[in-house]
Amino acid sequence: MKVLGVEFAPLNIPLKRRMQTLAVVIGAGLFFFGVFWGTGLFVYLLFFTSFYYLPLLYVVWMVYDSKTPKRGGRPIGWVRRWPIWCYARDYYPVSLVKTGELDPSRNYIFGYHPHGIVCAGAFINFATDSTGFDKLYPGIKTLLLTLNMNFYIPLSRELAMFYGAYRLNHNLHMLN
């Protein structure tokens, strides 16, 4: 369908494909615009409403909770299992192929290259449970490392910790 010279997607696209596209739009929106939404909400509440105390309490919380990103956040299983991640997996498509056994009593580092800016494949494979990593390799916990600045952005910080993301820095070390 063409309106005013703009070509729109046909109306007969299956619902499943529309859901996949919506999942990617939401995921990309959270990634690219989360900083604006989180910061915008923070500034709006602080300066333009009577709820100015909420951002102040959040800053106190961020200071109090500043070590959590260094320890792997607070992974929440139901966030990692949101159906949106399965739709995003199928959109690209992303798959995980098991080529060998891994001993669950050991630690592993998975290098992901080329990762680009968004790292959608790494995110879908290792920060969500949508490709079945937890079933293919039971007992191995996957965590994603990300830039320090991602843990200073209101709301995006909490989402990253819900996935179980770690703050990456030069002296990072993890203990069992």
Image (tube, rainbow, N blue to C red):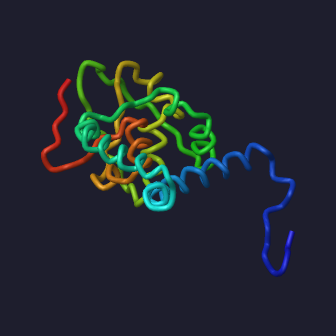
* Viewer-side residue, 41 vs 174: 41
Q: Quadrant of the C terminus?
A: top left
Up-down relation of residue 145 to residue 141 (above or below): below
* Viewer-side residue, 34 vs 105: 34
* Viewer-side residue, 99 vs 78: 78
Total marks in image: 0
Question: Residue 48: percent from the left, percent from the top?
Answer: 50, 61
Q: Note whether residue 128 is visible.
A: yes
Up-down relation of residue 67 to residue 156 (above or below): above
Task: Residue at the far front: name it.
Answer: 50
Residue at screen point 30% across, 53% down: 147
Task: Describe residue 56's horizontal placement relative to residue 21 as left or right.
Answer: left
Up-down relation of residue 117 to residue 59 (above or below): below
Question: Residue 33: percent from the left, percent from the top?
Answer: 50, 60
* Viewer-side residue, 46 vs 16: 46
> Dividing the picture into quarters, in which one does residue 99 lie?
top left
Q: Note whether residue 36 is visible.
A: no
Up-down relation of residue 157 to residue 31 (above or below): above
Question: Residue 22: percent from the left, percent from the top?
Answer: 67, 50
Question: Residue 11: percent from the left, percent from the top?
Answer: 86, 57
Task: Residue at the far left: name it.
Answer: 171
Residue at screen point 23% across, 23% down: 106
Residue at screen point 42% across, 36% down: 162
Q: Quadrant of the N terminus?
A: bottom right
Residue at screen point 41% across, 60% down: 117
